[in-house]
Amino acid sequence: TTCATILTRAIFTEGCKSVAAGMNAMDLRRGISMAVDSVVTSLKSRARMISTSEEIAQ
């Protein structure tokens, strides 16, 4: 989706800036992985099952 593309580009751009400024690339990778895990956990906790056509249409 467009949103995912924009977020990915922003993460990449900021990551490149950080590495160019001297940040360890592996530390950056670990930080991004931790952030991804946190977001996935948060989304899973907010998710709910849907079953009706009305819920799907919403």
Image: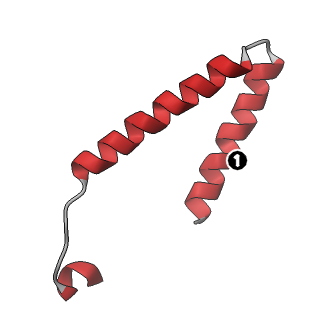
Q: Report the residue at 58% width, 66% height from top.
A: 1
Task: Please state which amino acid type lies under the numbered disc 1.
Answer: Arg
Q: Report the residue at 63% width, 17% height from top.
A: 27
Name the residue that disc number 1 marks. Answer: 9
Against 42, residue 1 (above or below) is below
Local SS, label 1: helix
Q: Residue furthest bottom?
A: 53
- Total labels: the figure holds 1
Residue 39, horizontal then vertical, whole percent: 40, 40
The part of the image, by quadrant, that contains residue 47 is bottom left
Residue 55, horizontal then vertical, whole percent: 20, 78
What colouring style does the render use? secondary structure
Q: Is residue 10 visible?
A: yes
Residue 11, horizontal then vertical, whole percent: 65, 38
> Image check: 32 left or right of 44?
right
Q: Report the residue at 39% width, 34% height from top.
A: 38
The part of the image, by quadrant, that contains residue 37 is top left
Q: From the viewer's side, name the closer residue of 4 and 41.
A: 41
> Image check: 40 left or right of 5?
left
Against 18, residue 52 (above or below) is below
Residue 2, horizontal then vertical, whole percent: 61, 64
Which image quarter is the C terminus in? Answer: bottom left
Q: Is residue 58 visible?
A: no
Q: Report the residue at 60% width, 48% height from top.
A: 7
> Image check: 27 left or right of 33?
right
Check disc 1: other Cα within 10 Å, few if <14, some if 14-19, many if 20+.
Answer: few
